[in-house]
Amino acid sequence: MLMTQQQARVFAKVAFFALFLFAPLLNIFRFDLELGHFIIFGQAWTISIDSILHGGGDSVDAAIKIFSRVLIPGVAFVAITGLLIWKFGRIYCGWLCPHFSVVEMINDLMLKQLNRVTIWEKAQIENKQLLPRIIVAIPAIAMAFLWAASLATYMLNPVELLTDLVNFNLGFGASLFISVATIVFSADFIFARHLFCKYGCALGLFQSLIWMANNKAMVIKFDRSRAKLCRDCVHYHKHKPCDQACPMRLPTQNMKRAKFTCTQCVQCVSACNSVQKDNPEGGLLSWVDGDEAIEVDRPASKYKSADEIDIKEIK
């Protein structure tokens, strides 16, 4: 039996989060501050021009090593990554990013405990008890500590660091870094995780800018010809299930430019499909690209049908 989109996405997120945690420990990728170079798949990755700098070679040898070990791999990585972003947008954020995985986890937890996914939006049923807030805060702080410790292993010997951590014998530098990083990540995860993804993450903004430049890139499209079904759905649920499902709190039925920070997590599509599960035509939201994607960035005013007027009523 094939996995659904959300099952595939959860599998990808869990696998990448595990890679994020264990990559330094397994010497898959890390930068050792003591050695002063990267370690990739167990091998030291250096430019190796020390001997040349001390008179052991010429400028041609130095240029070859710099091109082969820095410029060519760097250009190849940027080109391949840029091409994927150009075509698929912020799919890294929605399908792999360890930070976004925490965002979604805390979203779900906060929704169950506080009836909202951010502290900035109003809950349909206000819960002012202390216990639900504690239940949300403890996992958020625990994930912040896990993130802080994991980042430290990318810079220090992971085996020694984790051994000292378990034995409560961390040095001053490691203790300071983990403490400060835990505080910063705790504030991020509890108060500003969506704002960070939208406005604070340079990688996310970089992906969004490239994606927006390609009007044929993959995007979520709303089937305007069946807008009446959406109106009925909102009337029944008293809210838009698709917008409620979006971790970034975006207007999922709007044009592409209004979804600048879309992470391609497809949760809006899954929510709509769930509501329309008995409809033989399926949901009203879908992934599209190419010529179909161009239509997504057309202003709603260009649509003159009665169905389009209906969709305006529910915005």
Image (cartoon, rainbow, N blue to C red):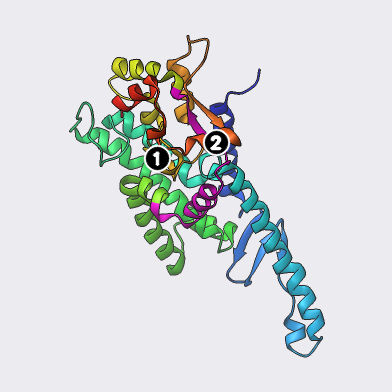
Q: Secondary structure at mark 1?
A: loop
Q: Secondary structure at mark 2?
A: helix
Viewer-nearest of labels 1 and 2? 2
Q: Residue at x 73, y 74 (%)?
A: 66
Tell me if 310 is positioned left or right of 221 in this view. Answer: left
* Quadrant where the image shows the C terminus: top left
- The part of the chain drawn in magenta is 199-224
Circle on res. 293: 2
Q: Residue at x 40, y 42 (%)?
A: 258
Q: Amino acid at mark 2?
A: Ala
Quarter of the image where one finds residue 91: top right
Within 10 Å of disc 1 (Cα), the crowding (few <14, some 14-19, many 20+) is many
Circle on res. 104: none
- 234 or 271, which is in the foreground? 234
Tell me if 50 is positioned left or right of 107 in this view. Answer: right
* Quadrant where the image shows the N terminus: top right
Asked if residue 164 is positioned above or below residue 122 in the image, the reply reads below
Give the residue at mark 1.
248
Q: Name which of mark 1 and mark 2 comes first in the sequence.
A: 1
Q: Position of residue 87 (x, y in %)?
A: 61, 44
